[in-house]
Image (cartoon, helix red, strand yellow):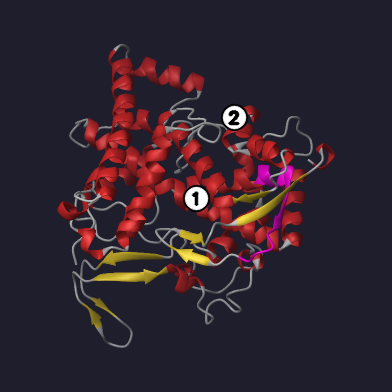
């Protein structure tokens, strides 16, 4: 079968199948894996951070969309589509982390954000039209022309940021540049890419940098938005778990004014973490992945998967296997209680895939989900909608017609 071209991401036509938009392969994968481990300007932990400390209250209030939700509720719109609002929030946050750019896309239109959303929709639509897998046919269609225009807009934005940073670097010493960035706490992913060199001391080209930045933006917003939306849905359906999470956050921040979360706090939210993991089990953002066998793989029954075969792996099926997960459709955070570890394979829970080609942004995503859920539960009670959503697997796991929930503001004393 012809393969969808991912050349707009710098990955080329060899990147197979639409769900691999969420992965990197070959040299690009190796580069991104190395860069993620290098990105430790402020400590020695192997995790991707956009800030040495979470931003101040006014940043969170705006970028997490909480002020917008508060306004919509005051105007009588307490019923919201989580996917619509949280997708904008994750894009807003990623643009800040990758480019140090405040898009304010949750309150006003942004051409760049609109282009990213349009590309996501067009890739999903193209996946269902097999004859349009050939690029030369696809680019003759109206959707293909829209795709090219959106790609050009995304590339132009990233190129402008790269050129601006190159000029700044050229005008000052690298050490001075890093010191100034560290002092203002604004080192971002573009800075890291510009300063990186390979083993031969060669710097990355503008095209390499653009490919990495666009991949993080495209692959990182929808997946986290899906995880957050379904987590809020599960907490809305289980108010006892929601209240326990809220109490955990309130206790953690009880002696602070204003209520701000530090990075070290993220490890002090065990029950919230359990709830997130159980939601990722029940509703994995990416339901299926693929892997190409680099050698013959012998199965327990004696059959062999030949080298070169592409295998589809159902994350959704693994997470709902009743022989591993009793009552798999039941939302039960205690499955992930660190005090009572379960005897199951580490590959029974793979929301971020597994092995050397797992999701390189999983720590970033988990940190973002903890922060968003903690601050949301601190200010709102989340209630289920009258209509039960139906799962809709696309590039990510969505809900048919949107994932609608109701929000109820908590009093200032409840915070």
Residue 396 placed where, x, y %? 44, 58
Identify the residue position indicated by label 2 in the image: 59
* Magenta span: 374-388
Q: Is residue 61 visible?
A: yes
Residue nearer the viewer, 191 or 110: 110
Name the quarter where the C terminus is drawn: top right
Question: Are the two marked residues, 2 and 1, in contact with CB atoms closer than 8 angstroms?
Answer: no
Please tell me which of labels 2 and 1 falls first in the chain: 2
Left or right for 142, reference 413: left
Q: Can residue 367 be seen in this view?
A: no
Residue 280, above or below 43:
below
Identify the residue position indicated by label 1 in the image: 224
Q: Residue at x 28, y 38 (%)?
A: 149
Q: Residue at x 17, y 34 (%)?
A: 200
Packing grade of label 1 (10 A; few <14, some 14-19, many >=20) is many
Residue 248, above or below 100:
below
């Amino acid at each position: 079968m012809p393969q969808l071209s991912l050349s707009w991401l710098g990955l080329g036509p060899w990147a197979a199948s639409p769900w691999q938009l969420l992965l990197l392969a070959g040299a690009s994968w190796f580069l991104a894996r190395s860069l993620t481990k290098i990105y430790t300007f402020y400590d020695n932990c192997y995790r991707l951070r956009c800030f040495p400390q979470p931003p101040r209250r006014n940043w969170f209030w705006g970028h997490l969309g909480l002020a917008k939700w508060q306004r919509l509720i005051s105007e009588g719109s307490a019923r919201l589509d989580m996917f619509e609002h949280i997708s904008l929030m994750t894009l807003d946050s990623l643009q800040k982390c990758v480019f140090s750019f405040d898009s304010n896309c949750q309150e006003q239109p942004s051409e760049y954000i609109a282009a990213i959303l349009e590309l996501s929709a067009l890739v999903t639509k193209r996946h269902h039209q097999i004859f349009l897998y050939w690029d030369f046919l696809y680019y003759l269609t109206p959707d293909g022309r829209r795709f090219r225009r959106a790609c050009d807009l995304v590339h132009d934005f990233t190129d402008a940021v790269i050129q601006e940073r190159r000029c700044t670097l050229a005008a000052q010493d690298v050490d001075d540049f890093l010191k100034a960035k560290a002092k203002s706490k604004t080192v971002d992913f573009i800075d890291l890419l510009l300063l990186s060199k390979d083993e031969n001391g060669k710097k990355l080209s503008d095209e390499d940098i653009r490919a990495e930045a666009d991949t993080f933006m495209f692959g990182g917003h929808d997946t986290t938005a899906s995880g957050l939306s379904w987590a809020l849905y599960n907490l809305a359906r289980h108010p006892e778990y929601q209240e326990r999470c809220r109490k955990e956050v309130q206790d953690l921040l009880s002696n602070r004014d204003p209520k701000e979360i530090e990075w070290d706090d993220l490890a002090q939210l065990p029950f919230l973490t359990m709830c997130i993991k159980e939601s990722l089990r029940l509703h994995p953002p990416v339901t299926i992945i693929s892997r190409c066998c680099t050698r013959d793989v012998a199965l327990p029954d004696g059959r062999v998967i030949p080298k070169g075969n592409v295998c589809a792996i159902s994350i959704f099926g693994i997470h709902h296997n009743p022989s591993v997960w009793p009552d798999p459709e039941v939302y039960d955070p205690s499955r992930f209680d660190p005090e009572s570890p379960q005897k199951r394979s580490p590959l029974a829970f793979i929301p971020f895939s597994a092995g050397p080609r797992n999701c390189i942004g999983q720590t970033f995503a988990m940190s973002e989900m903890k922060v968003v859920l903690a601050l949301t539960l601190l200010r709102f009670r989340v209630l289920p909608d009258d209509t039960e959503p139906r799962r809709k697997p696309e590039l990510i796991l969505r809900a048919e017609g949107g994932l609608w929930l109701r929000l109820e503001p908590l009093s200032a004393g409840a915070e």
